[in-house]
Image (tube, rainbow, N blue to C red):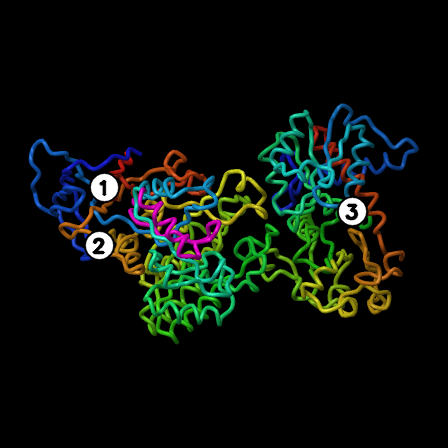
Amino acid sequence: MQEKHLLGLEHYPAEDIVSIIDTAFSFREVLDRPIKKVPSLQGKTIVNLFFENSTRTRISFELAQKRLSADTVNFSASSSSLKKGESFKDTVQNIEAMKIDAVVMRHPDPGASLHLTKYVDAVVINAGDGTHEHPTQAILDMTSLQERFGKVKGLRIGIIGDIAHSRVARSNIYGLKKLGADVMLCGPTTLIPHHIDSFDVRVTHDLDEVLDWADAVNVLRIQLERMDRGFFPSVREYRNLFGITSERLKKHKKEIVIMHPGPMNRGVEIDSSVADGKEAIILDQVLNGVASRMAILYLLLGGKPENN
Amino acid sequence: MNLKKLPKKLVLQGGTILDPLSGRSTKGNVVIEHNKIKSVGSAGGAKGETMIDCSGLVITHGFCDVHVHFREPGREDKETLQTGSRAALAGGFTRVCIMPNTSPPLDSPESIRFVVEKAEECPVHIHPIGAVTKGQKGKELTEVQAIISEGAVALSDDGLPISDAQVMRLALEYTSMFDKPVINHAEDECLRNNGLMHEGEISTRLGLAGNPSLAEAIMIQRDLELANMIQTKLHVPHVTSASGAANIRRMKKLNSNITAEVTPHHLFFNDQALLEYNTNFKVAPPIRAENDRKELIKAVKDGTFDCIATDHAPHTIEEKEATFELAPFGMIGLESCFGAVNKVLDMPLKELLKLLTVNPRRVMGFEEDLFTIGCAAELTIIDPDQEWIFKEQNIYSKSRNTPFIGEKLKGKVRFTISKGSIADLK
């Protein structure tokens, strides 16, 4: 691996993303065994630093670490000394002083994972830094696309929802473009960044256009607090314009693979009939999340890539 | 820095005397006796007198900065009037105007008197700017007359924009009785929203909330219209955007009382500098795009901006070590100012020096002729061509928050003479 850390995909080498995905598939095979554990990271210590609430990402990382036989410690802001006024720097330097090999961090502030690398020598893996990046989510999304389509290159991927505030969208755009996919963004004008031009993506505000065009769509969770701040007027109107419903999908006479990073607002951005339907690969994403994170931890902590 | 009392008589020998008021440049000596200008341009200077060899150097007016933060009272851990004064001397400044966002704010005649009295012991001239509204809350006017009579030279709520246009109108109208400028941090707070940096491609990539140029341009235009209606003094601080500068250029034709400033950091850097989330680039108003930076330089050269002001804003290392989201806005700037603007503006020295001397003095109503025989010596001696790397050891502020560390600058301050002392920056 060319980079010590995984902070984001914007500057991450494409060939290393490919190596991670290939390795993820060999770990997928481990997850299907009756004994789902390998000794690959025995003796390694990993800290999960969660400054922001998260259930699925934290569990996914923790399971990945346990499957690889690493020793893990969890730290969340609510249980920490940060509440007692200790600075971020002191907190992380204290943790590092206890001899750890890697830190997985979720933090509400953009750039926090880069910031962390200034204070620790351990490998840093970004598990989401504010509205900046969420690289492991994008990698598991691409692993799922690879699994479903056998390739990522040449695919047409729609990303639907609140692009402006989405770390999942940013990391997906960077990763998909690097692997040769074509990307179209769709959402209300207020939630597509004004300065999106330089990202080399298509933009539409018409859901039918993206559904007509795409092989797969990644449906983002719409945060209802955005409504209170005026980015869209009501759930009803959002659902009318951008909600993925069975009726909407039926208008398009082809199969469209449905993805969602979770947690879902059923009945808002996605209907249950779609989320639970045969074209949805949402639960495959969850399983691939564990496999992809195993691959990331394994490779960044010195393992050799698997070539499929 | 070696800071000493001036000897009874001091001869600054063999320098180029550049008078930024007349624009004239002559070779010769400047003699200071009993802390006052005794002669300018004569060859004189007898043996046995204290001399400073100024050959190859330029002797000019002491610099004046109309926009600094010295944090006293309240945040003496960041800066004090004394430490700020040393930073000023290091930058060639003999006179500064301090913003009222202290704790408590300078919004009463008593608080103005407190800093004026404390400033007397400092080696540079320090003038307080009083708050426009009580508690800088943007609602009720302060006792403007009393604040001015205690020594305030202008009125400003500093970093807090006066959002209510009616309050701004009243502030301009009321203050016009006393012929002092009102300074408003020109940003529409609704449009600025929670913006942390310039809204553009870089903010979109970094995932940092953007502050659009329009937030500034709109507020500047509102203030300019009000000042034009009242025909009173308005000083626009730290302009950052091409559109803000264009508004000032246009409205200056209608109202000769409008003045404006620009900072060295907005002239020197663009928003690409923020790609690594370096909190030393987190300033308010934000560092904008390259096109804005170029337009700001043009606006300096065509006279749209009257002066350079540093907005010297000290913060502790601990505060700036936070994430970009949490770190406070501001950078220090006194020590690096001359070398930065002299490099980036690349304009005739006598024109540049106007922006640091005569023009800011005119904005604040200070004496403009510092080479008058008998006037108290307030001089700066510079080597305009020396190229140097700005280092931490060049900082005399109590704080260290500047991205200029490591930057190559052009032009160095060698001596600053102020209030009976001489600072040797060698």
Amino acid on which the number 1 mark rests in the picture:
Gly
> Is residue B37 placed above or below A248 in the rendered structure?
above
The magenta span reads: B92-121
> Is residue B398 placed above or below B239 in the rendered structure?
above
> Is residue B420 placed above or below B364 in the rendered structure?
above
For residue A177: magenta?
no
Q: Residue B217, percent across and down?
A: 47, 66
Q: Which sits in the foreground, A259 or A54?
A: A54
Amino acid on which the number 2 mark rests in the picture:
Pro
Q: Residue A197, percent across and down?
A: 59, 60
Q: Compute the Cα span from label 3 to label 2.
A: 70 Å
Instruction: State if disc 1 and disc 3 touch (CB < 8 Å).
Output: no
Q: Residue B362, percent across and down?
A: 28, 60
Residue topped by disc 2: B20
Quarter containing the C terminus of chain B: top left
Residue topped by disc 3: A146
Frontmost of labels 3 and 1 is: 1
Quarter containing the N terminus of chain B: top left
Frontmost of labels 3 and 2 is: 2
In which quarter of the view is residue A237 placed?
Answer: bottom right
